Structures are given as C-alpha cells and as structure tokens.
Amino acid sequence: MRDQNPAVPGNDPPYAKWVMLAIVSAGFVAMTVNWFTISTGFDAIGEEFGKAIPDVAFLISIFVAAYGVLHIPGGMLATRWGLRRTLALGLAIEAAGSLLSATSTSFAQLVVWRAVAGAGASVFAAVGIAAVSVWFRDHRHALALGVSSAAFSVGTALGLYTFADITDATTWRTSTVVAGVLCLAVAALSALCFRVPRGAGALAGAHLTREGLRQTLFNKHIWLYGLAFFGAYGSYLAASQLISGYGEDRGLPGGQVGAAAFLIGIAGVPGSIAAGWLADRYLSPRTLFAAGAVLEAAALACVPLTGPHTFWIPAFGIGFMFNFVFAVWQTVPGGMRGIAPENIGTAVGLMLTISAVGGFVLPWAFGQIVDGPGYGAAWTFLAAVSAITVGACLFSRSGARSSVPSPGAPSTPGAAASKRVTGAAEA
C-alpha cells in the first residue's frame, strides 16, 4: 500500500476528521450514560433487593473493576481487528450489559450484568481515545481529545441528572433500558460510519508484534502517567457518584444537592475544552496535568467545608479540573516518541488499567473511612491521594511530538514485511 500522511490535504476531505470525532464523541456520551445511570436507582435497588446503600454502592466498584480489566486486551484487539470493529463491539457489549441489568431478579445477577457493561465500556474507552488520536495526531490533538473528553462529561451529567428524572418518573429498570438502547444505536452508527484515514492500512487491522508490545506495555513513561492519574481518576469516580448521598446525609437543600450532581458532570465540558486549547498553544502536557490534578485535590478538600449555599462550588471545581486533567492525559500516548499509531490503543489501555485500580479502590476506601472517622476524613483522604500520586508524572518526559511514521507508513524499517494488513477495505 502506498504510504500517505493523513494530515496532508487531499487524502481525506477536510471535514472527515470532524465527522469521525463526532461519532467517537457520541460513543463516549453513550458509554458514560450507561455507566452512571445505575446510581440514580440506588435507593430503589436497595429497597427491592434488601441491601443497604454501602452494599448497593458495590455496583460502582464492580463496573470499574471490569472496566479496568479489558483496556489492554481492547487495545490489542483494535490492533488486530481494526478500530471500527472494536469501537462497535465495545459499545454493543456495554449495551447488552445494561439491557440485561434491567432483567435482574436478584442482586447477584445485577452485579454480573454490571460487570459485563463495564467490560464493554473498557474496550470502547481505550479504542475511542486512539480513534481520535489517529485523526488529529499532527494537528489540534489536545483540542480534539478535549472535545471527546467533554462528551464523557456530557454523558456523566445526563446519567446523573437527566436520567434521574427518568428513574423518578418510571423505574430504575426503565431508565437502564433507555440507556442501553441509546448505547446500541451508537454502536450501530460506529459500525456503519466510522473509518480510519485513507492510506492508514495498519489501523484497519494488523498483526500484533513484539515491537508493538515493547512500545506500549514496557514503556516506563506510560506506566508513570498511569500511576500519576491513579488518585485524580479514582477520586472523581468516588465523588461524582457519592456526592449526592453526602449532601442528603448533611440535610442540605435539595436544589444544592441536585446542582452539585449536575455540575460535577457538566463542568467537565468547559474544563476539557480549556485544557485542549491550552495544551495545543501554550503549556506542556506535564505542566497542565500536574497543575490540574493539584487543583482537583483542592476542590475535593473543600467539599466538607461548604455551607448550605456553597455546596455546588467544589462540585463544579472537581468536575472542571478532573476533565481538564483527563483531556491532557489522553494526549500522552499519541504524542510520545516511539509509539506507532496502530499501538496507541494498547498504550492508552495500559494507562487506563493502572488508573482504573484507583477507580475501584478509592470509592471502596471512601466508604470504609465514612464508617469510621466520618465524611470529613474521607474527603481529605481523596484530596491527599490525588495530590500525592500526580507526582509520578514528574519523573517522565512530557508527551513530546511523536517521531513515529504517520499512519500508513511502516513504523520501523522492514515493518511492512513483518505485518500482514488485514481488512484494509475498512479505510
């Protein structure tokens, strides 16, 4: 296949990359709606299955545990099968998990189906970041990932706020079905309409190679950035799904609690866009990443200090700064020397897997601390972990512009001979 650079005008229509970004962003909305919607039914689920809220909150941890398991296999699958098939597969699995959750006749069944949904989200998340990176790697990379990260925020806000109204008007099972159908529709859209840049045959499917694994799984900088995001990631997942319960436990006005639940999600939209704009123009990813994580920690520490009219302020800060950090963090594999385009998904998968451990451990630890010292200590714990773990990025280089050949060109001399491109018609 003739080598081409997808950033050169004429290979693809100028609007093509933005259409692909819109498709992937729709996938992130659907993915996070199906992630967070279940929490709007926690009270009803606890009553139906005879479980206390701390027990029901295990549904958060099991989703995140499954979400962390398949990031790396999902990235490898994208290398082998191609981005389009893997994007659609991840969303379809998550949709199936959500739809089957609504059929659960026991809490154990519900746990199993939430794990299935988390596994599907795991496959989609790493591949979705890679799908954006391959289209924008050479221009407006951070801004494009800021847009897809904003879609993550929109889905979070819809799942926590809009779907709460659907749950209240119907049942938790109905809202879960609606979310699942939405996810299935976007899976079909991805299968029918997404494609990779012209000339990027390896992105349509290629053999896994030892060199590809070396670039990703044994890359110390990828490990360091994964560890650096451990605290900020896990703390956000704990805060976003438990802040409403905390506000209600304090007896705060319902309007303040609702505003906090909405803002912790939707604030990520301006946060993501701001991070992308700044990273593309002014500051290094490492500087922005570290500063954003520290500011997220500050917002977490302020939650127990709020009054009945200021509860929404740190919630906005947590949502804004988490997504600010997330948008910058996603650019690291696509901008790092030595990682070929077809291996970006696996590199992102490793980073997400490492940070997802925080998403499993920190919500659980938050609950244990609440049962002991109380909420004040629990929020301080989240803030401290977020601020401390970000220091890992200081031992890594920033996400420097890649020197790897562009999609469609062999990643190393003779690489074309070592790869058998499959499914090139997808391009």
Image (cartoon, grey):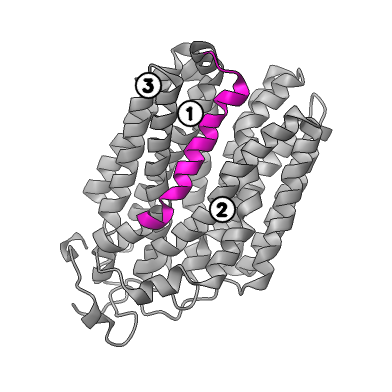
Circle 3 crowding by C-alpha within 10 Å: few under 14, some 14–19, many from 20: many
Name the residue tied to disc 2.
Answer: 355
Query: Which region of the structure is painted magenta?
Result: 50-74
Across and down, in percent, residue 324 comes to: 61, 53
Marked residue nearer the N-terminal end (2 or 3): 3
- Per the image, the residue denoted by label 3 is 102
> Is residue 407 placed above or below 61 in the rendered structure?
below
Query: Residue flagged by tag 2: what amino acid is it?
Result: Ser
Q: Earlier in the sequence, mark 1 or mark 3?
A: 1
Q: Which mark is residue 70?
A: none
Task: Mark yes or no: residue 270 visible.
Answer: no
User: What residue type is disc 3 on?
Assistant: Ala
Of badges 2 and 1, the one in the foreground is 2
Disc 1/disc 3 C-alpha distance (Å): 12 Å
- Tag on residue 37? 1
Magenta span contains residue 250: no
